[in-house]
Image: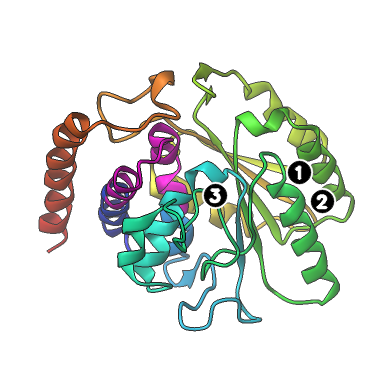
């Protein structure tokens, strides 16, 4: 996909995610919206105009030649579900039942869902899981990669830094961690920019993305990551909580919120118009 097509896809996934959350009565609208372009770039983007960013096969989830994505920021899983359904990992009708009793799609990542590499129930554990996968792939001498997506709030968890130190010790350049720096944690503003230097001091290669909603910048960062060897990569993305939902952008109280019927009625037509504009421009 070219950049315009990725922007169109991000608009589509944003719409699908909001509808999925609303039908399921689920929250974290603000937090989900901040990670959309990161996940869209990983699943649909290409490097150097031809190489798929992340290798996967919806027909054979978990095949040996595929890459792994660990969504440590598990409360944003509705975005990943929307993408997996769009790619054909499972039927889109499953999105209507997010978090419902007996439903396949839980409100946190579950490895029982096709396309989900690992279950995530507790904050701060994702990088440790990604570390273990990356280390095992290194020992097996494969070319597979592990991508981890972390929220900035979970960087307060010591386990994240234990994993960061171990990844550096073993020079795991097959591990790429994204930090979704939307600057909000549990409804409060958060300042964690100084932690970027901690990744650097631990031996990681830190790559800045000043606009984490610009797919072009994200892909450029991923292409740059390909040039580094013998280091794990941290791609630090400056994002906006509630991105795309105008009344929720940069508002801490929407980070874990559920949208009301009136709020959905106000934003869905706007997002549909934006999506249709992208479709028209691409045609």
Task: State which quadrant residue 207 falls in.
Answer: top right
Label 1 crowd bin: few (<14), some (14–19), many (20+), radius 10 Å? many
Seen from the viewer's position, the closer of residues 92 and 210 is 92
**Mark sitting earlier along the chain (3/1):** 3
- SS of the residue under disc 1: loop
Identify the main secondary structure in magenta: helix
Residue 11, x across and y down, in percent: 26, 49
- SS of the residue under disc 3: loop
Left of 173 or right of it: where is 14?
A: left
Seen from the viewer's position, the closer of residues 95 and 77 is 95
Tag shown at residue 108: 3
Residue, disc 1: 204
Seen from the viewer's position, the closer of residues 160 and 104 is 104
Is residue 154 on the magenta stretch?
no
Contact, mark 1 vs mark 2 (Cβ under 8 Å): yes
Give me the C-alpha separation between circle 1 and circle 2: 8 Å
Does 41 sit above or below residue 257?
below
User: Magenta part of the protein: which range?
Assistant: 16-39
Residue 133, x across and y down, in percent: 75, 63
Task: State which quadrant residue 240 falls in.
Answer: top left
- SS of the residue under disc 2: helix
| Residue displayed at 45% across by 30% down | 256
Residue 227, x across and y down, in percent: 65, 58
**Mark sitting earlier along the chain (1/2):** 2
Q: Quadrant of the C terminus?
A: bottom left
Residue, disc 2: 167
Mark nearest the camera among 2 and 3 is 3
Left of 195 or right of it: where is 29?
A: left
């Amino acid at each position: 996909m070219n950049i315009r097509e990725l922007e169109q896809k991000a608009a589509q996934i944003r719409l699908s995610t909001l509808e999925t959350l609303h039908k399921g009565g689920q929250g974290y609208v603000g937090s989900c919206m901040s990670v959309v372009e990161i996940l869209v770039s990983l699943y649909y983007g290409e490097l150097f105009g031809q190489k798929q960013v992340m290798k996967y096969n919806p027909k054979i989830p978990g095949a040996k030649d595929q890459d792994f994505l660990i969504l440590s920021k598990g409360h944003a899983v509705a975005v990943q579900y929307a993408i997996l359904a769009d790619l054909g990992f499972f039927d889109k009708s499953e999105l209507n039942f997010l978090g419902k009793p007996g439903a396949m799609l839980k409100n946190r990542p579950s490895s029982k869902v096709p396309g989900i590499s690992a279950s995530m129930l507790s904050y701060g554990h994702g990088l440790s899981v990604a570390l273990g996968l990356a280390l095992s792939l290194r020992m097996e001498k494969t070319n597979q990669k592990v991508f981890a997506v972390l929220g900035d709030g979970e960087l307060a968890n010591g386990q994240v830094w234990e994993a960061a130190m171990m990844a550096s010790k073993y020079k795991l350049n097959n591990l790429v961690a994204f930090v979704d720096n939307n600057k909000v944690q549990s409804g409060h503003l958060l300042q964690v920019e100084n932690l970027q230097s901690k990744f650097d001091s631990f031996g990681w290669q830190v790559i800045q993305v000043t606009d984490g909603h610009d797919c072009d910048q994200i892909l450029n960062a991923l292409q740059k990551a390909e040039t580094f060897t013998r280091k794990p990569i941290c791609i630090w993305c400056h994002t906006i909580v509630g991105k795309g939902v105008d009344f929720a952008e940069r508002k801490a109280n929407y980070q874990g919120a559920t949208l009301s019927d009136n709020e959905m009625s106000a934003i869905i037509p706007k997002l549909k118009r934006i999506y249709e504009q992208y479709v028209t421009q691409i045609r």
